[in-house]
Image: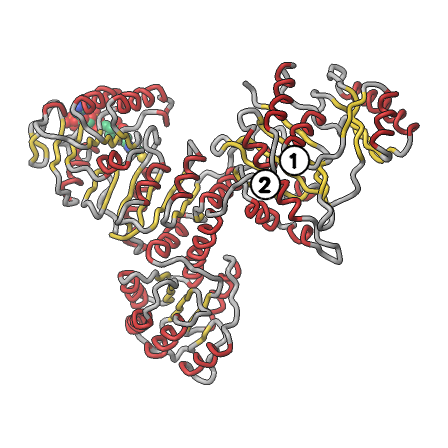
Amino acid sequence: MDHELLNQLLKPKTIAVVGASSVPGKIGYTVVDNLLKSGYSGEVYPINPTATEILGLKVYPNIKDVPAYVEAAVITVPAKAVPQVIEDCGQKKVKGLIVITSGFAESGRRDLEDQIVEIAHRYGMALLGPNIVGTLSNSDKLNASFAPFLPLNGKASLVTQSGALLIAIDAATYTRNVGFDKLVSIGNMADVNIADLVTWLDDDPNTTCISLYIEGLRDGRQFIEACQHAHKPIIALKAGVSAHGAAAAASHTGSLAGAAKVYGAAFQQAGVIGASDLSNLFDRTLALSLQPPMKGDNLIIITNGGGVGVLATDAAEKFGLPLKFAPEEVQNELKKYMPEFGSAKNPIDLTGQAGNEWYYDAVRYAIAQPWVDGMVVLYCETAITNPTEIAHGIEKALKDAGIHGKPVTVSFVGGEKSVAAMSELIKVGIPAYQAPDMAVNAIVSLREYENLSHMVAESAAPCAPSNQAAAREVIARVREQQRLTLTEIEAKEIFLAYGLPITRTLLAKSENEAVELAQKIGFPVVMKIVSPDILHKSDAGGVRVNLKDTASVREAYRTILTNAKNYKAEAKIHGVAIQEMAPWGTEVILGSVNDPTFGPTMMFGLGGIFVEVLKDVTFRVAPVTRGQALRMLGEIRGAPILSGVRGESPRDREALAEVLCNYSHMILDLGDEIAESDANPVLVYEEGRGLKVADARIILKKK
Ligand code: COA
């Protein structure tokens, strides 16, 4: 969306409130009152059919009667009156519409929502909402909402799909001491969406961190792209991760592709840092808005108490940034700033006697050491020290050290004095938290930001040449027969077109042909029923393996056909597949779904019980880069099985990563056709020996 148009919507020079009211307590009254109270410097024009004056302002019966240019309109009239109001705004050449009114798509009136968007677009207006609280900005002294006041001033900006949450967060900014410049309620996102605001806030000089509360995105790919292009940290809390996409799935992948996993994958690919809950969103937003990214893994913890030091150490490991001992020369220097019984290993325990000078010396020295990438400073309130003085010591040490590219977070554990001292630290840009694990988690988010930025920068070039046309021919043939399920042989033809290493498979239509093809492929062979109506071949008694001679092939052919008929009498049988029997390897599964939000999305996991029982799988929105594919292999709990455990040699992860990459391009290219697919099992061999896709399944989209 056009940047200037969003400026006109979110930083308007003049505002009308259509549906302004002189009745205190009504939303139309509160919005006018808020605009005046927030110190907004532009003109405010209340619009009401009968009133003449509201809060000392002259009232106009219609926006078209205002004798001046109106850049944006806040709309607080009932839903049925909104279309005409927007029409009037269009004629008045208003640019931005902030539609607070509820009663649109969220309550079954998609038609009314489409209608207002159509009118807005006809006049080139941008529409925020409907069904929102409004928008607030400290730097513009603008409270165009019915939230009670501007938030505590700060450098982060929040976009939220829940209006009620905006109001709750607004008040909590003061109690939690986390400042925001802008709070934007985005509601139904009928026009302006989260991706538009990410791009706009990325250009906003008063925002250093973009914080998002997401219930459900409409266009997941636009969101990913907008976030990938942003230059500021983006943190998101995704709500509603329980019941998504998992219903009525025909494949393993479909049943495992819950919102938590798919959104988690999409966030990672978009470079978006996740928040585990609302509290964590606050904690991480504070650090991300005030501190630089953490460039390496070396975290140093300075403390005056062993207990909080241990808690922080545990947290560092839990959140994925385990502590290492500081190098000897660093330890030797730090020993000078503590008594004999202190510890300079890491955590650096200055002991309970540590006053502000010790903190000053230790912090100033440690932050300047090349080994140190980030620092957490902990303090337990003692009777012999003063929290405010300690805070000043830390602040001065960081200032005097003059190091700007390394993040620092702080936790003071104590009473009111500690809380007050932490407020001072936050005011000077040092994030401070009530508990050591919160300070560690916050600094970990700065490490995650750095890592994600590198991942996003990787190119997504396809790994191997593909033959999309050949794949589409197979699909066209299947569509001609009005089928949605491909046979294994058809699915493998498509896999082959994308360079996937399939086991050689030929179709036999008679017993004699089965023998002939088995001889051609070479014994032993596998035989499988080929029927678009039998999805689970083993359940139907339609699979025989390790057939070593012609007699067993003949017997298997007859048995498979009989079993299939008994299983489903009306099943259409194409024949029996004769297949190269791949040697045993580590079983893995690849799969895909067409996610409603993100489109073609792939899954990887170990096969057999790992996927059936443990659901040990990982997802990515297609396409994946080679780097991402390798990370997927490392992400599952069973990763050590691929890297070689208990004397087993490592599996061919390079070849597997290439297959993942090619698979992701296949499902993306054919995303308009393929609903779900599985490669299961895929047999992975030792390093250098590659892998084989032993079975393949593709289900087409209904058209
Ligand atoms: N032009 C100008 N003013 C108009 C108008 C029009 N076409 N039509 C009505 N109005 C005026 C009314 O006269 C009234 O002013 P008054 O108090 O002086 O009579 C004012 O607009 C509001 O209309 P009213 O009918 O009293 O509605 P309301 O204030 O009870 O409710 C909404 C209006 C928009 C607040 C309500 O419909 C709504 O959507 N509430 C939910 C909002 C919400 O929670 N959003 C966030 C979700 S997270």
Specify the farthest residue to the right.
Answer: 551
Residues 646 and 20: in front is 646
Which residue shows up at 88% across the image and 27% down it?
A: 553
Q: Secondary structure at mark 1?
A: loop
Residues 581 and 319: in front is 581
Quickly name the residue at label 1. Answer: 499
Q: Quadrant of residue 165?
A: top left
* Alpha carbons under labels 1 and 2: distance apart: 10 Å
Which residue shows up at 41% across the image and 45% down it?
A: 236
In the displayed structure image, the side of residue 488 where residue 113 appears, left or right: left
Amino acid bearing label 1? Gly
Quadrant location, ligand no. 1:
top left
Where is residue 381? Give x, y as percent.
36, 71
Which residue shows up at 32% across the image and 36% down it?
A: 186
Q: Are marks 1 and 2 in contact (CB under 8 Å)?
A: yes
In the displayed structure image, the side of residue 683 where residue 560 appears, left or right: right
Amino acid bearing label 2? Cys
Dot 1 or dot 2, earlier in sequence: 2
Q: Which colouring convention does the figure follow? A: secondary structure
Q: Is mark 2 within 8 Å of ligand 1?
A: no
Query: In the picture, which quadrant includes the C terminus?
Result: top right
Which residue shows up at 61% across the image and 43% down it?
A: 617
Q: Is residue 90 visible?
A: yes
Specify the farthest residue to the bottom.
Answer: 340
Where is residue 405? Give x, y as percent.
37, 62
Q: Quadrant of residue 546?
A: top right
Specify the farthest residue to the front.
Answer: 465
In the displayed structure image, the side of residue 604 where residue 118 appears, left or right: left
Residues 461 and 254: in front is 461
Q: Quadrant of residue 289?
A: bottom left
Quickly name the residue at label 2. Answer: 463
